[in-house]
Amino acid sequence: MSSIAPSAPQPVVPQQLALEIEDDFRPCAVVPVYNHERTLPAVVAALLAEDLPCVLVDDASRPEAAQAIDELAKHPDVHLVRHTYNQGKGGAVTSGLREAARLGFTHALQVDADGQHDLSCVGLFLDRACQAPEALICGYPLYDASVPKGRLYARYLTHVWVWINTLSLSIRDSMCGFRVYPLAPTLVLLDSVELGKRMDFDTEILVRMHWREQPMVWLPTRVHYPKDGISHFRLWLDNLLISRMHARLFGGMLLRAPRLLWRRFLR
């Protein structure tokens, strides 16, 4: 009786591996929107030019803004989530991330609707996310002369608190909302912890993902503040929410301090 020897497994060539990675990498953009009807069309056009589907989250915008959003949502690659009441930036981003996962995307690029972010580097961020699909790709801002000096200097207070609450200097900037989230670990966090829903969201999610040993990659990105730009930062309320967030995180850091120090110094 003749026997046939089992064939040796075929090696995976780099081209095949790249195709497999790309098949498992399905990105979109998540854009929280609140009364940005003037700047949003250009943002969406730039993202679609990168072949990047968009999830727009209308955070209870005024009627004229909602109408502009509805027009954009007629595009087959633009998906719309609408809040009946304003939940804040964090609430809008959270809704967008959940919708992106429901639609079958694996990664989501968070982009502001006000035109501050340099969308010419979208391709770079997506390429890096494709190369490291398990990592959170974070932008750290390179400001031009348009940045308000008060905002620039105030950011350092948050930087210091983030360094304290992580016992690390690894988070370069927690307030820049230009980043690519890997949706699977991000939703695990969102399902287990209630995060801040307003301007405290961007910082809190990074600190908590750092606690969970989430890999992060940092890339520079230019940020511009238009002269007639719209800011929804509420000086007293948002600063109060951010202060409360830092206090909560400080308590969480104390509980995790032995493990955080072990990760930093003994690993």
Image (cartoon, rainbow, N blue to C red):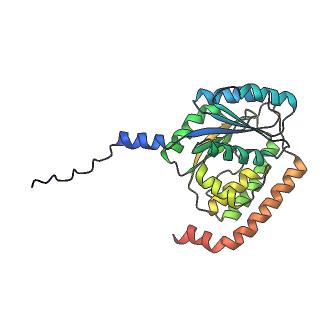
The residue positioned 80% from the left and 28% from the top of the image is 37
Q: Is residue 154 above or below residue 147?
A: below
The residue positioned 81% from the left and 27% from the top of the image is 67
Q: What is the quadrant of the N terminus in the image?
A: bottom left
The residue positioned 58% from the left and 30% from the top of the image is 50
> In the rendered view, does 26 fall on the left or right side of 63?
left
Q: Is residue 199 above or below residue 46?
A: below
Q: Is residue 207 visible?
A: no
Q: How many numbered marks does the figure carry? A: 0
Residue lying farthest left?
Answer: 1
Residue 79 picture location, percent across and down: 68, 34
Instruction: Tell which of 166 and 192 is nearer to you.
Output: 192
Q: Is residue 70 visible?
A: yes
Residue 149 picture location, percent across and down: 80, 42
Residue 194 picture location, percent across and down: 75, 59
Q: Quadrant of residue 104?
A: top right
> In the rendered view, does 3 fall on the left or right side of 187?
left
Q: Quadrant of residue 170?
A: bottom right
Instruction: Tell which of 181 and 100 is nearer to you.
Output: 100
Residue 48 picture location, percent across and down: 62, 28
Residue lying farthest front?
Answer: 1
The residue positioned 75% from the left and 56% from the top of the image is 195
Q: Quadrant of residue 144?
A: top right
Q: Is residue 3 above or below residue 151?
A: below
